[in-house]
């Protein structure tokens, strides 16, 4: 039984290696664009949202929340603008991991 | 859809600026003659380039108007914006994740989303520790504990101590091969057992002797005064070692003249292919034959 499993494992590994050899190298680019606090407003406006009294409003004029922790977003605590449906995240560092795990 | 890199370059050309000069130069890219960004290669089939654009470059791009196009996610590229004081963390999180990608990909099929995010944060904290930024690591640990409570902290300890790799590695490798639902459920059960009973668990490895295991059990039951202790072990010789040690411990405990406890032992074996794991649950209860104190007689 053990020998059969070993043979199967070897065959499977060889097949995987063969398949990998045939496939092209898959390249992926992750681009992080830095923005400063003073550019936060123009960055928000470019996504179609609005800023009123420092608070960020969605297209339907509701207050925008951090996608992970649900905190109301202002120009002060805006941390990231990330893809999805252009989601906003606050400046809590660990909120980023909720997005980054999608890239695994 | 154009690649993120090409899109940004296109916008830059339109603006007449040289984007290359604005890339933050962490490490030279190895695949192209460009500079800036970090380059990863996983195996033969996959390369990930992490590129960081400085705030001055981003400001120029923002003026172009159709900047929202750059924030996109596809199989070939991801574009996002991050505040300049947070970029260090984000970059380190991505680096940690790329390095542990194989493990994460395997675990993704088994554990919950929250556990998965907590593990990703734990990996980032570990990166900070490796870079000797203890204060930042501590701050992040507190954040992790606040967000994910005690379970988050245990995931951190499980990962940082290397026990995750040691105990979950072989079952996960086997799942990659077999992929059955039963095996996945077993791995999830093992993951939960490791985390739920971490406080007083004993993780037995090759170097641990029988005496050390017995001593560990006695300390937990007699000094720490805990009701349940779990013993984790992998591979047949270690499982045999655990069985022997538990018997030895029971023998020693039966010699007690006072404070006699009864112990119940439950063995849970996780056999997946040629990988054997054992979780041995030792539970303490008061002995039935212990004499209770004589009741005071009310003489009135």
Image (spheres, coloured by chain):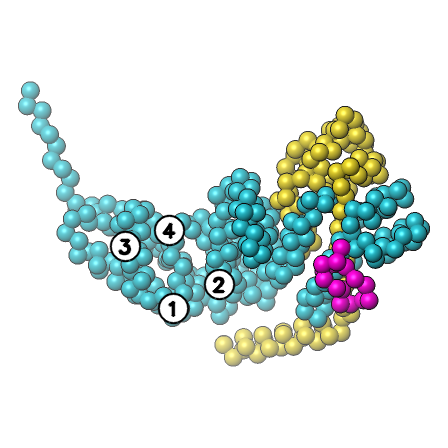
Mark 4: few/some/many CA within 10 Å (<14, 14-19, 20+): some
Q: Mark 3 lies on which chain?
A: B
Residue picked out by circle 4: B200
Residue picked out by circle 3: B218
x%, y% of residue B273? 51, 68
- Residue at mark 3 shares a chain with residue at mark 2: yes
Identify the image quadrant of the C terminus of chain B.
top left
Which label's residue is closer to the chain start, 2 or 4?
A: 2
Mark 1: few/some/many CA within 10 Å (<14, 14-19, 20+): few
Range drawn in magenta: B24-38
Give the Cα distance between marks 4 and 1: 19 Å
Q: Which of B210 and B10 is in front in this view?
A: B10
x%, y% of residue B202? 38, 57
Identify by letter the chain in yellow: A
Residue picked out by circle 2: B166
Q: Kindly indicate whether the residue at mark 2 contacts the one at mark 3 (C-beta within 8 angstroms).
A: no
Left or right: B23 as drawn, with respect to B283? right
Q: Is mark 1 on a helix, strand or loop?
A: loop
Q: What element carries label 3?
A: helix
């Amino acid at each position: 039984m053990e020998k059969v499993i070993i043979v199967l494992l070897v065959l499977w590994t060889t097949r995987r290696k063969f398949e990998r050899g045939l496939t092209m190298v898959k390249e992926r680019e992750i681009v992080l664009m830095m923005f400063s606090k003073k550019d936060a407003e123009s960055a928000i406006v470019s996504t179609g949202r609005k800023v009123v009294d420092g608070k960020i409003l969605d297209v339907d004029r509701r207050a925008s929340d951090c996608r992970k922790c649900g905190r109301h977003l202002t120009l002060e605590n805006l941390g990231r603008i990330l893809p999805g449906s252009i989601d906003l995240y606050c400046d809590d560092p660990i909120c980023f991991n909720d997005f980054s795990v999608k890239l695994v | 859809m154009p690649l993120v890199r090409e899109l940004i370059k296109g916008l830059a050309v339109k603006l007449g600026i040289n984007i290359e000069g604005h890339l933050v130069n962490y490490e030279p890219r190895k695949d192209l003659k460009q500079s800036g960004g970090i380059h990863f290669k996983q195996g033969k089939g996959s390369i990930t380039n992490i590129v960081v654009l400085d705030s001055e470059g981003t400001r120029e791009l923002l003026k172009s108007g159709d900047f929202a196009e750059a924030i996109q996610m596809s199989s070939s590229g991801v574009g996002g914006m991050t505040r300049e004081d947070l970029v260090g963390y984000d970059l380190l999180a991505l680096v940690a994740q790329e390095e542990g990608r194989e493990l994460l990909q395997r675990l993704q099929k088994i554990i919950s989303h929250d556990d998965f995010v907590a593990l990703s944060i734990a990996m980032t904290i570990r990166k900070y520790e490796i870079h000797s930024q203890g204060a930042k690591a501590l701050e992040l640990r507190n954040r992790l504990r606040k967000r994910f409570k005690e379970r988050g902290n245990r995931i951190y300890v499980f990962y940082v101590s290397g026990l995750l790799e040691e105990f979950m590695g072989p079952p996960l490798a086997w799942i990659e091969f077999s992929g059955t639902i039963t095996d996945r459920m077993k791995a999830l059960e093992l993951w939960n057992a490791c985390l739920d009973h971490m406080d007083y668990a004993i993780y037995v490895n090759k170097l641990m002797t029988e005496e050390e295991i017995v001593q560990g059990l006695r300390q937990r039951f007699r000094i720490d005064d805990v009701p349940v202790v779990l013993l984790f072990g992998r591979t047949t010789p270690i499982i045999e070692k655990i069985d022997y040690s538990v018997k030895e411990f029971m023998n020693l405990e039966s010699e007690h003249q006072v404070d006699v406890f009864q112990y119940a032992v439950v063995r849970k074996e996780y056999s997946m292919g040629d990988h054997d794991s054992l979780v041995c649950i030792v539970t303490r209860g008061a002995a039935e034959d212990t004499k209770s104190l004589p009741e005071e007689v009310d003489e009135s």
